[in-house]
């Protein structure tokens, strides 16, 4: 069906990872313009990291959380003294949307060696998936090139945000940057049924839970959107 990701197998004669591989370079080039959209968001996360109670731990979590919206949500929960269990729960719920991406990617990676699947999972986030999931050939290497580019660029942006302090926080639209960044990535995917299901369900949930606290509303919307995306993928 048109919304189902076809199974792709790399040629046995070409290893998954070679920096000069055309598909790897194509993935890196495709990700480069996306970094411009990510830059303000990364600076905002960096400012939040610098203002946290433990900036070093918050900075190191750039890799362990590896998601700007989840990172901000975790820092916000910790800043309100809710404890690490609540913070971890919020972070997992915000990143729960990645389960829909993983489900869509599974057919293409099922035949890959375990070490390759582990790397793919570590690099999984919105932009690499959005860029690679409809690529007809060289999918795995393209995904790797795009994912590694963001994996190294994102911490650099967060670090720069730490160094620039609260400058971005003075911008009136700073609170909208996470939504704008994710929105820019999602709009192009709305023609695919699972993404449309996830966005619609999360939007309805956000409206329905608007009277609740922002943290609760975010958790519910993330969970509902992720569930709808997985169900939409299975229905496809």
Image: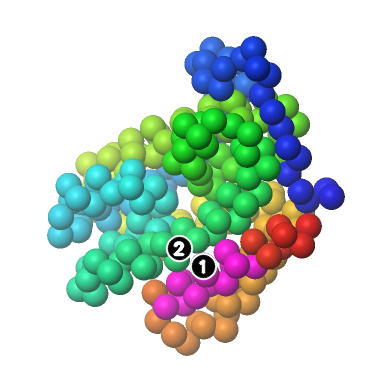
Residue drawn where x is 60% and y is 56% of the image? 100
**Which residue does the image show at 39% across and 47% down from the upper left?**
66
Q: Which residue is mark 1?
A: 222
Element type where label 2 sits in the image: helix
Residue drawn at (83%, 48%) of the image: 2
Residue 44 seen in the figure: no
94 is higher (above) or lower (below) than 113 = below
Residue that carries the numbered disc 2 in the rendered image:
94
Instruction: Find out whether residue 236 is within the magenta segment.
Output: no
Question: Which segment did they paint magenta?
Answer: 216-228
Q: Does the magenta-highlighted stretch encompass residue 218? A: yes
The one of 211 and 14 positioned closer to us in this rendering? 14
Residue 96 makes an appearance in the image: yes
Asked whether, in this view, residue 161 is left or right of residue 153, the answer is left
Q: Residue at x 28, y 49 (%)?
A: 61
Estimate how packed mark 1 is, as few (under 14), some (14 to 19) or many (20 or more) residues with alpha carbons within 10 Å.
Answer: many
Distance from the alpha carbon under mark 2 to that under mark 1: 5 Å
The answer to whether the residue labelled 2 contacts the one labelled 1, judged by CB atoms less than 8 Å apart, is yes
């Amino acid at each position: 069906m048109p919304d189902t990701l076809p199974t792709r197998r790399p040629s046995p004669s070409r290893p998954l990872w070679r920096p000069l591989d055309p598909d790897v370079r194509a993935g890196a080039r495709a990700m480069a313009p996306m970094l411009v959209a990510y830059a303000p968001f990364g600076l905002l996360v960096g400012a939040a990291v610098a203002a946290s109670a433990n900036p070093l731990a918050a900075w190191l979590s750039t890799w362990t959380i590896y998601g700007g919206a989840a990172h901000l949500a975790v820092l916000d929960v910790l800043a309100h003294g809710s404890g690490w269990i609540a913070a971890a729960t919020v972070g997992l719920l915000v990143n729960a949307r990645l389960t829909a991406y993983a489900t869509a990617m599974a057919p293409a990676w099922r035949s890959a060696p375990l070490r390759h699947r582990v790397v793919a999972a570590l690099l999984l986030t919105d932009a690499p998936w959005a860029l690679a999931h409809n690529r007809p050939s060289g999918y795995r290497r393209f995904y790797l090139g795009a994912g590694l580019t963001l994996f190294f660029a994102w911490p650099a942006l967060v670090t720069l945000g730490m160094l620039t302090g609260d400058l971005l926080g003075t911008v009136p639209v700073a609170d909208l940057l996470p939504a704008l960044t994710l929105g820019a990535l999602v709009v192009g995917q709305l023609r695919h049924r699972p993404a449309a299901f996830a966005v619609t369900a999360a939007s309805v949930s956000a409206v329905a839970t608007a009277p609740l606290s922002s943290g609760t509303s975010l958790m519910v919307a993330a969970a509902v959107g992720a569930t709808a995306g997985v169900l939409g993928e299975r229905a496809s």
